[in-house]
Image (cartoon, rainbow, N blue to C red):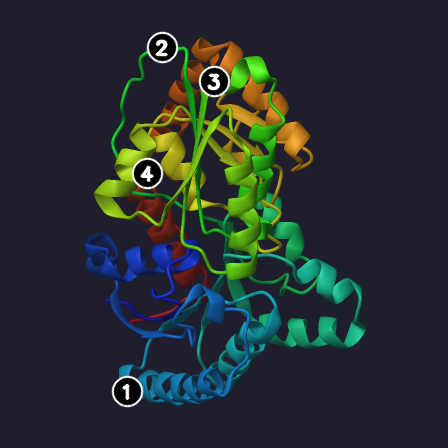
């Protein structure tokens, strides 16, 4: 059996990539195909830690690198799978580890969960050279062909690049009764770049005649006290429509929040946004989706079929699509049902596992790797 050594970010903190990574190493299907071992390479323990550089994180990075090299030499894997961060301090930590392992003779596969490389290397020939060194002789798994262009200028063109879309567990599907009230849901971390304030401002811009038929729930973990203070003022100032922040929810509580909603809203401008799990969960639960055209979102949401994809993530753009659903609840239900069908066809967790195993098998066969 082929030995695979996973170097990946695991919860905490809880975010899309760490959730997907956790599902991979816990997968019995993956374990039935490969002999695996792993090291958690995330030095951050909370969402607010992710963008900070602290002494504690530097110490953890040193420990992670030593632990990874020791375990690599003990385990002697045929393939090393690394979820490479595309930018910032995390990239340099991951790239240093990748270069060390390649020096030790490792066959590397990068699984990309973020973007931003193309913009970085366009501004610096030195950084472009360094990225090329990191990606040399590395096969790549990315989330969508739409995102291939982000790495095209730095990847090794002689190696494979394969698309493996994310998948999620089925949270349960509820056929929604038509109602005069439209329930909108934001479900993601409460950070400015994800757009909860944009969604809240969109509600305040609705015509007064429609506000009484609207509820807007915000579910997610707050990470920035200053932003939350500003956000809560926006929510409190709205007197006619029902808006409420419900904090983070997981498991059954999150499933209940999805079941209670009609439309999912994610006007994200997050620079690293690629393939949000929250959209997949919303589609699985039968919600119509309003989301911005960021990363591969336009590949997930079929504009006008399973929801609306916004060219600009502005309060006015979100408001306009909200109005359409408020005035036509039947359309919201039709879009939600279409999204559910897309989920069943492409984005179940079983489909993700199958696509991942097929991709890794293809890479292994192309590299002529032996167990």
Disc 3 residue crowd, few under 14, some 14–19, many 20+, Cα 10 Å: some
Q: Earlier in the sequence, mark 1 or mark 4?
A: 1
Secondary structure type for disc 3: loop
Residue 361 picture quarter: bottom left
Q: Which residue is mark 2?
A: 178
Choose between 360 and 269: the one closer to the eye.
269
Choose between 327 and 102: the one closer to the eye.
327
Residue 347 location, x and y as percent?
38, 38
Q: Residue at x 32, y 35 (%)?
A: 257
Q: Which residue is mark 3?
A: 212
Residue 282 picture quarter: top left
What whole-number distance in Å separates the C-alpha atoms at marks 4 and 3? 36 Å
Residue 172 location, x and y as percent?
25, 31
Q: Are marks 2 and 1 in contact (CB under 8 Å)?
A: no
Q: Are marks 4 and 3 in contact (CB under 8 Å)?
A: no
Q: Which residue is mark 1?
A: 74
What whole-number distance in Å separates the C-alpha atoms at marks 3 and 2? 16 Å
């Amino acid at each position: 059996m082929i030995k695979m050594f996973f170097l990946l970010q695991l919860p905490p903190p809880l975010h899309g990539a760490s959730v997907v990574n956790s599902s991979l190493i816990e997968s019995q299907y993956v374990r039935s195909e490969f002999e695996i071992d792993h090291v958690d390479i995330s030095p951050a323990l909370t969402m607010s830690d992710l963008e900070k550089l602290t002494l504690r994180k530097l110490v953890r990075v040193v420990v992670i690198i030593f632990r990874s090299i020791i375990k690599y030499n003990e385990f002697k894997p045929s393939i090393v799978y690394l979820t490479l961060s595309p930018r910032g301090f995390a990239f340099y930590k991951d790239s240093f580890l990748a270069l060390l392992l390649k020096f030790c003779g490792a066959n590397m596969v990068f699984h990309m969960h973020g973007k931003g490389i193309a913009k970085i290397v366009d501004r610096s020939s030195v950084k472009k050279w360094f990225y090329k060194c990191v990606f040399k002789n590395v096969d790549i798994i990315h989330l969508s062909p739409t995102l291939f262009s982000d790495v095209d200028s730095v990847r090794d063109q002689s190696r494979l690049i394969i698309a493996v879309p994310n998948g999620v567990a089925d949270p349960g599907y509820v056929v929604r009764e038509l109602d005069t009230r439209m329930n909108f849901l934001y479900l993601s971390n409460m950070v400015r770049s994800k757009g909860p304030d944009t969604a809240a401002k969109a509600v305040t811009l609705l015509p007064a005649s429609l506000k009484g038929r609207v509820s807007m729930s915000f579910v997610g973990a707050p990470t920035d006290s200053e932003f939350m203070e500003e956000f809560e003022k926006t929510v409190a100032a709205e007197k006619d429509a029902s808006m409420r922040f419900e904090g983070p929810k997981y498991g059954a509580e999150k499933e209940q929040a999805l079941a209670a909603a009609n439309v999912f809203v994610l006007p994200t401008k997050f620079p690293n946004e690629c393939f949000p799990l929250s959209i997949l969960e919303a589609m699985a639960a039968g919600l119509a989706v309003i989301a911005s055209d960021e990363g591969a979102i336009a590949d997930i949401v079929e504009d006008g079929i399973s929801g609306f994809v916004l060219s600009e993530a502005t309060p006015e753009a979100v408001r306009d699509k909200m109005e359409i659903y408020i005035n036509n609840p039947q359309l919201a239900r039709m879009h939600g049902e279409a999204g559910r069908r897309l989920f069943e066809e492409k984005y179940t967790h079983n489909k993700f596992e199958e696509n991942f195993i097929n991709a890794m098998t293809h890479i292994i066969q192309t590299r002529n790797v032996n167990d």
